[in-house]
Image (cartoon, grey):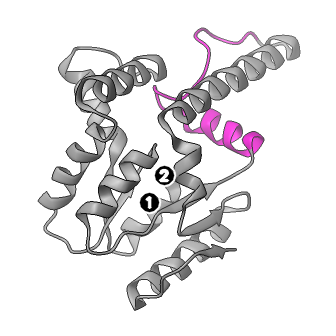
């Protein structure tokens, strides 16, 4: 989804990332932006301020752009989707998905501090590398379970558009450009882009 948002930015659209709300809160609390810390903060904000807490803060960021069309990256629940639907004249929920093995490989290459992984260095042997991949897959599974607990799966069932990101970056670019063109022309309704 991050690459799809990057492409949208390149097309001239404003992009607001919901995870930035949580990363800002981690910085305010003096915490490292690890997957565990960010997950804990996301849970705490939702428990304290309601299921749409992060969406409310993200909407403020989106409004500050002054743009009519804003891409919001990182929706995690049906409550967030419903909040945005209630606040926008038009709202399109777009699911960007890829197979777990493709996602894991991309996360390992990305190397962001909040990516699911295990701590420590991997020795140079195949056994250690295999264990690290297994641990990374477990960490990714844990993140997905946490997000499903927030209602991510229910939200994605109601997506207006779905983009399969299992292919190349150029394939994703083609799909995002096509979808942005459709949305800008006012085409609505459920569609599989791919």
Along the line of sight, which residue is nearer the eye, 52 or 67? 52
Question: In this orientation, does residue 190 appear?
Answer: yes
Along the line of sight, which residue is nearer the eye, 163 or 153? 153
| In-image side of 81 versus 52 (left or right) | right
Q: Is residue 112 magenta?
A: yes
Q: Quadrant of residue 8?
A: bottom left
In this rendering, the answer to whether 44 lies above or below 5 is above
Q: Is residue 170 magenta?
A: no
Q: Which residues are magenta?
A: 100-123
Q: Which residue is mark 1?
A: 5
Number of other residues with Cα within 10 Å of mark 1, as a class: few under 14, some 14 to 19, many 20 or more = many
In this rendering, the answer to whether 46 lies above or below 151 is above
Q: Which residue is pictured at 46% across the width and 25% down the height?
A: 113
Along the line of sight, which residue is nearer the eye, 57 or 84? 84
Q: Which residue is pictured at 48% across the width and 32% down the height?
A: 112
| Residue 2 image label | 2
């Amino acid at each position: 989804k991050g690459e799809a948002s990057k492409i949208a930015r390149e097309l001239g659209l404003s992009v607001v990332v919901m995870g930035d709300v949580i990363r800002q809160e981690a910085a305010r609390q003096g915490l490292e932006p690890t997957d565990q810390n960010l997950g804990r903060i996301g849970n705490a904000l939702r428990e304290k301020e309601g299921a749409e807490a992060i969406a409310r803060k993200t909407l403020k960021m989106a409004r500050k752009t002054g743009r009519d069309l804003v891409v919001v990256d990182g929706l995690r629940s049906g409550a967030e989707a419903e909040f945005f639907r209630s606040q926008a004249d038009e709202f399109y929920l777009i699911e960007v998905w890829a197979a777990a093995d493709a996602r894991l490989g991309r996360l390992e290459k990305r190397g962001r501090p909040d990516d699911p992984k295990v701590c420590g260095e991997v020795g140079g042997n195949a056994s250690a590398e295999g264990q690290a991949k297994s641990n990374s897959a477990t960490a990714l599974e844990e993140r997905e379970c946490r997000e499903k607990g927030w209602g991510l799966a229910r939200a994605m069932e109601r997506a207006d558009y779905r983009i399969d990101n299992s292919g190349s970056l150029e394939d994703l670019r083609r799909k995002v450009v096509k979808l942005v063109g459709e949305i800008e022309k006012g085409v609505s309704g459920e569609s599989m882009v791919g």
